[in-house]
Image: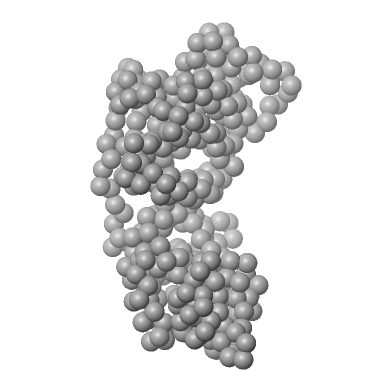
Amino acid sequence: MSRFIVTTVGTSLLTNQAKKVGQELVSQLYRHANDREPHSPEWRQTVAGLLDQALEKPDSAEISTIKAYEAAYGTLQPDDYHMLIASDTFQGKEVAERLRQIFQRRGQTVDVVAVRGLTTESETAFQNAMKEFLATLQNQLDSFVARQGKQAEVIFNVSGGFKSMVAMMTAFGLLKGAPVFLMFETGGLLRIPAMPIVFDESKVSDDALALLEMMDRELMPDAERMRDAGVPDILYVVDEAGTATLSAWGLAVLQTLSRRIYPERLLAWPRIEYEQMFLRDWEKQREPDDRRRLQETLARMAAILEEHRDPARLKTDPALQGETLRNTGIEHARVTQSLRISYTVEGGGEPRLKMRRFGAHDDVNGNP
């Protein structure tokens, strides 16, 4: 069994050491908790000195939880992977780096991921930072599970970090079917077991799911369109101009639902129609990942047309690599390295695509 441990990092390693010095130093740490950089060279030296002292006898919520976990479930091994999630603050990154050194000395494979923009200065900044991070985390989890197969185990250690991040990562872990660990204030290990938590799919129609997917591509709808589509407001945030973007929860739900729904059924995407040949090709392609990648490609094409009304952009998009097949008037675009789709463009100023073929590169190009 190989384990992927996700640990949220706070600053208890630093503040616990500061408490040995005095309350005034602890208060200074709290006042500067959201600083991206040290406010003075002297402050940088103060924090470094505290952490150097902490290394002699480290005491933190993250370490206590990992030690308790190992006592109950076995020592972490070099082939286990430990990811430390740090805030985008001076203190958060400094503490995470020292924790990395501590865990590495104990024989663990450890990386620090500082989530760009992650502070508690505003809800919008926090949501945007978590959304970007969750996409990265999901990709890494997918890669780990693909490599390890049934031997893979994912766990979340949420004893440290901003309360808002702890809450979000706890829910994300449970949504992914992973156990979550943290320490009681009295010192005992609390295990929230992996539970069959699923998002109520009845709250997200296929049209709403398609809209969320296009927002993850290029589409920037207004709040009215989100309401008209019946998208739950927890799944998006609206800026001062009234433009909606995916929230961190929206991305997590999109990732979960798309991985289950996209291989099962072909969604209706705006400005895209399906010819019978294309539907037959869909039925032939049974590989779940190929079907998912197709729908993500269709979402990208629909988002570009919805946002710009310009089919020429399909040819300049680096992911689609669209081009006109010679002597046919038929377009084709890239789905994966080996899969292609063909289509025609109709509608003039209100363009729509008629999808013709989906399949292997040579098959589609030879008979588009």
- In which quadrant of the rendered view does residue 255 lie? bottom left
Q: Which residue occupies 33% across, 17% down?
A: 187
16 shown above or below 90: above
Q: How is the image coloured?
A: one colour
Q: In the rendered picture of this protein, how many numbered marks are placed on residues?
A: 0
Q: Which residue occupies 73% across, 23% down?
A: 40
Query: Where the N terminus falls, by quadrant?
Result: top left
Residue 72 x/y as whole percent:
29, 23
Q: Is residue 218 visible?
A: yes
Residue 364 x/y as whole percent:
49, 80
Left or right: 249 as drawn, with respect to 127: left
Q: Residue furthest right?
A: 41
Q: Which residue occupies 38% across, 36% down?
A: 2
Left or right: 37 as drawn, with respect to 365: right
Q: Which residue occupies 57% across, 37% down?
A: 114
Residue 336 x/y as whole percent:
51, 66
Q: Is residue 183 visible?
A: no
294 shown above or below 70: below
Between 23 and 135, the one nearer to me in the picture: 135
Residue 264 x/y as whole percent:
32, 68
281 shown above or below 147: below
